[in-house]
Amino acid sequence: VNAKFTPPFLSAKFHTLYEKHEYKKIKRDKNKAHFLYLYSISVKGDYDFFSFIIMPKFLEEKVKI
C-alpha cells in the first residue's frame, strides 16, 4: 500500500484525565490500565469515550487536529 499521507498521532493523555492519586492506583492495576479508555473520566479533558459514542457529531468533527 502506498499511502499518500501519514495519519496524525493523537494521544488521549490519560494522566491528565484523572486526579494524581487515582491515576497512581490505575497504573498499578494492569487490567484497569488496559481498559482505561472505557472508563468515565474524573477531570474534563480532550478524551471522553462516552461523549464520543453519545453525541450526534461524527468523531472526525469532535477531534481537532
Image: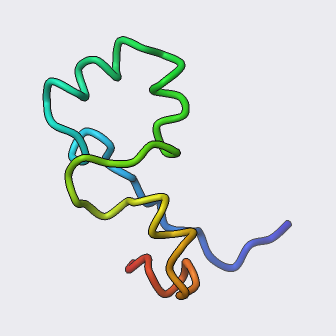
| Residue drawn where x is 57% and y is 69% of the image | 53
Q: Position of residue 31 (x, y in %)?
A: 54, 19
| Residue drawn where x is 15% and y is 36% of the image | 19
Query: Where the C terminus falls, by quadrant?
Result: bottom left
Query: Where the N terminus falls, by quadrant?
Result: bottom right
Left or right: 13 in relation to 33:
left
Say which quarter of the image contains residue 24.
top left
Q: Position of residue 25 (x, y in %)?
A: 28, 17
Number of numbered discs: 0
Residue 34, compared with residue 41, is above or below; it is above
Question: Hey, which residue is sitting farthest right in the picture?
Answer: 1
| Residue drawn where x is 49% and y is 45% of the image | 37
- Scheme by which the image is coloured: rainbow
Looking at the picture, tell me which residue is in the foreground, 1 or 38: 38
Left or right: 17 in relation to 36:
left
Looking at the picture, tell me which residue is in the foreground, 57 or 60: 57
Residue 51, compared with residue 16, is above or below; it is below
Looking at the picture, tell me which residue is in the foreground, 6 or 48: 48
Q: Position of residue 33 (x, y in %)?
A: 45, 27
Q: Position of residue 48 (x, y in %)?
A: 40, 60
Question: Hey, which residue is sitting farthest top in the picture?
Answer: 28
| Residue drawn where x is 39% and y is 53% of the image | 11
